[in-house]
Image (spheres, rainbow, N blue to C red):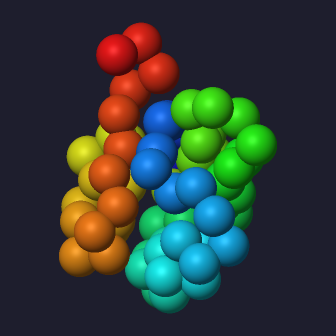
Amino acid sequence: METKLVVKSNINCENCLRRVTPFLDKSEKIKTWSVDTVNPDKLLTVTGEDITFEVIENILKPSGFKITNLDG
C-alpha cells in the first residue's frame, strides 16, 4: 500500500542532501522523497510502499541524519 509520510529532519543544506541521497535512493520501499530546506522544520516528505516513521528512521540511521514527528 502506497503511503506518504512528512517528518521534521536535520537535513538542512545541499551537502546534507548529497550525503543522504544514496540512503534514500537505494531503498526499494521509497518511490519519491524531497526535503524542504527552506522550512524551519526541514520537512522530509517520503512516499512509497508501507512507509512508516520507523522505516525512514532506519534508512537514515547509517547516514547520521535524524527525524522527528511533526507534533514533537
The image quadrant that residue 13 belongs to is bottom right
- Residue 67 is left or right of residue 4, and the answer is left
Please say if 70 is above or below 54.
Answer: above
Find residue 2 and report its horizontal and vertical position in percent: 59, 47
Please say if 18 is above or below 47.
Answer: below
Please say if 1 is above or below 65.
Answer: above
Classify the position of the C terminus by image quarter.
top left
The image quadrant that residue 4 belongs to is top right
Q: Nearer the viewer, residue 49 or 8?
A: 8
- Residue 21 is left or right of residue 72, and the answer is right
Number of marks present in the image shown: 0
Please say if 47 is above or below 52.
Answer: below
Find residue 67 and report its horizontal and vertical position in percent: 36, 44
- Residue 20 is left or right of residue 44, and the answer is left
Q: Residue at x 57, y 32 (%)?
A: 41
Q: Nearer the viewer, residue 24 or 35?
A: 35
> From where the camera sits, is residue 42 visible?
yes
Find residue 14 and report its horizontal and vertical position in percent: 67, 73
